Image (spheres, helix red, strand yellow):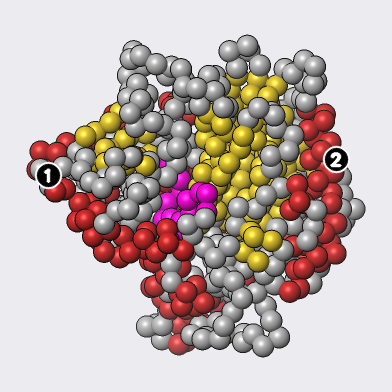
Amino acid sequence: MVLYTSPFPNSFLSVLHSFSWGLIFPCYWLADRLVASFVPTTYEKRQRADDPCYFHALCIIITTPIYLALLVASLPFALIGFVLWSPLQSARRPYIYSRLEDKHHANGATLLTEWKAAGNGKSFCFGSANVCLLPDSLARFNNVFNTQARAKEIGRRIRNGASRPQIKIYIDSPTNTSISAASFSSLVSPQGGDNTNRTVNAGIKRTTSMEYKGDNTGSNNSEDCREDKGGAGDPNEGEENTCIVRINGEDNGHVSDTETDTVNGQAHASSPSEPSVEGDAELSKTPNHKQKEGDSGSLDSYSASRESLVKVRVGDGTVDQSTVNNKLLYKASIMKKTSVRKKKNTDETFDHEISAFFPANLDFLCLQEVFDKRAAEKLKEQLHHYFEYIVYDVGVYSCHGCCSFKFVNSGLLFASRYPVMDAAYHCYPNGRGMDSLASKGALFLKVQVGSTPQDQRIVGYISCTHLQAIAGDTTVRCEQLDMLQDWLSEFRKSTSSSSTANPEELVAFDVVCGDLNFDNCSSEDKLEQQHSLFTRYKDPCRIGPGEDKPWAIGTLLDPEGLYDEEVYSPDNLQKVLESEEGRKAYLVYPTSKNHSSSQKGRKASLKGNGRRIDYMLYTEEGLYLEWKVEVEEFSFITQLAGLTDHLPVAMRLVVSTGEDDP
């Protein structure tokens, strides 16, 4: 299958499309600004609180006639442009595939090595987020604004979190000789991994990983965390961009100044230069650009989230928690949270957390609501500093390919560190209401993640979608889930080049993610909760229809509280969501007849931990029979605090080959 690198098959149509859009854009921009001036966000209202009450009204009185006059003047040109633009959409391709040619600008891509499936296995990390990049006037109805600046900041934060060093901690417990790895590290042996991962034998202070500053330059900042490839062992196995720190149960946990300086020096060495003045000027337009030094989501921050950069899993034996707490010099609240989590979920087979950072070494990213085309370009430019392959501007326009007229695309965007082999897009034909104006649909992708010693390709399938949003449209969403499954089966059949007798490809994973616009606790969503999709695909957060696991939280934030000081930064939002009262105040909960319209300060017992409408699903069906796929970690991410009304989610899968380490 040919991947489309331009929206039109020839340059003539591209030039004609640019000309027609150039005629439409002034009218579109003026209408957007006119409506936006009448829809203030809570952040703007607070900023104007000290201004005289007449000041804002005076500004509107002055600017509205100007906008209206210019809008009327631009209408004739917009009509001419629309007459040219609309028929051109029949020749437009359903997506644009962008590959970064200069890999020096891709921090993540330069660190990847091909997986040869010769070791014990490999892990792959998937992320999904609804980023609400609508035209500014429409975004304001979700209490977010300045779409262009937000797009750039979202991209920078994502690559900031994903490109940081993945630090793994191994603890030699004084009461247990076994060593248990930190999260995301089950594939690396602390005893035998020195060929592929650098180990630092030192005690740990909290500043060990806190001194890392996110990447702002796109340069490779993690060379110190990789073993020289001249060493023994297969350099293709293991995790990229990884540092290992081993803590020995000696000297009563004493950390010498020399050891501390050694570890801190390593983190300082990976810090890039300061961000550009131009970037800071544009980002100052966003509401949370003034984050304090120490806020993990800030690109100028030298500190990280409490457990996002360094996480500790204590040995399986009986361990004195106070001893470990003193040894690691962690804050009491952090160790208390870890202890409680382990006791409450002793039967859970994987780690889970609320993290202030996107996972390190994020491999695949699926975004929804990237509707604004200029914002998509800014976002793509930032993501290309980490992801080499991006599929964006996905969807159809005008009347082409769907039943009703489409003003905007699907809003889907996919980014990958692995090459995309095939891609396909389908538009849902049954959209209703406002959703019918967007070409919401599903994007299907096939990626190559490695090859076997016998030159068989190792591939994976990823599906990204965004379903009908209007409450009560249960039937519509169920029909869309049916179409999603049918299209996915067709895509796998059409792109498979293997047969049972002569397999040319080995399928490592099959993942479905996106904003499904229903949760697993609301009584109104019972039909969706019982859909056959959840029979074939597994939801790591779900026990069964209508019941989530105790640790799972909602992903839909209450828009009215986005700019409250308590949730103003990623660290603050993380702390709030760790408490039940905080979740009740700032998450949207399943609706009920007795539900009050105001969520702030409510004390009533509510079902679940909020509306979880953003999903990460995986299946064990249709994969290579001799391999096993398991979840290693699931995360709810607060790094985009103040930039969107959704919580991103991330899942790391382990593909175990069942072979011994070489």
Q: Measured from the top left, where is residue 411 in percent x and y?
A: 68, 51
The region drawn magenta spans 348-360
Q: Measured from the top left, where is residue 64 in percent x and y?
A: 60, 74
Question: Which label was assigned to residue 338?
Answer: none
Q: Measured from the top left, where is residue 441 in percent x and y?
A: 77, 49
Secondary structure mostly seen in magenta is loop
Instruction: Tell which residue pokes out farthest to the left in this image.
Output: 257
> What's the residue at 48%, 26% (across, down)?
112
Which kind of residue does numbered mark 1 sit on? Answer: Asp
Decide if residue 520 is in sight here: yes
Which kind of residue does numbered mark 2 sit on? Answer: Ser
Dot 2: element: helix
Of 558 and 101, the residue lying toward us: 558
Residue 528 drawn above or below residue 188: below
Q: Is residue 334 magenta?
A: no
Q: Is residue 350 magenta?
A: yes
Q: In the rendered image, which residue does mark 2 sit on?
A: 90
Q: Measured from the top left, where is residue 395 in percent x and y?
A: 75, 45
Of 182 and 56, the residue lying toward us: 182
Q: Quadrant of the N terminus?
A: top right
Question: Which label was assigned to residue 251?
Answer: 1
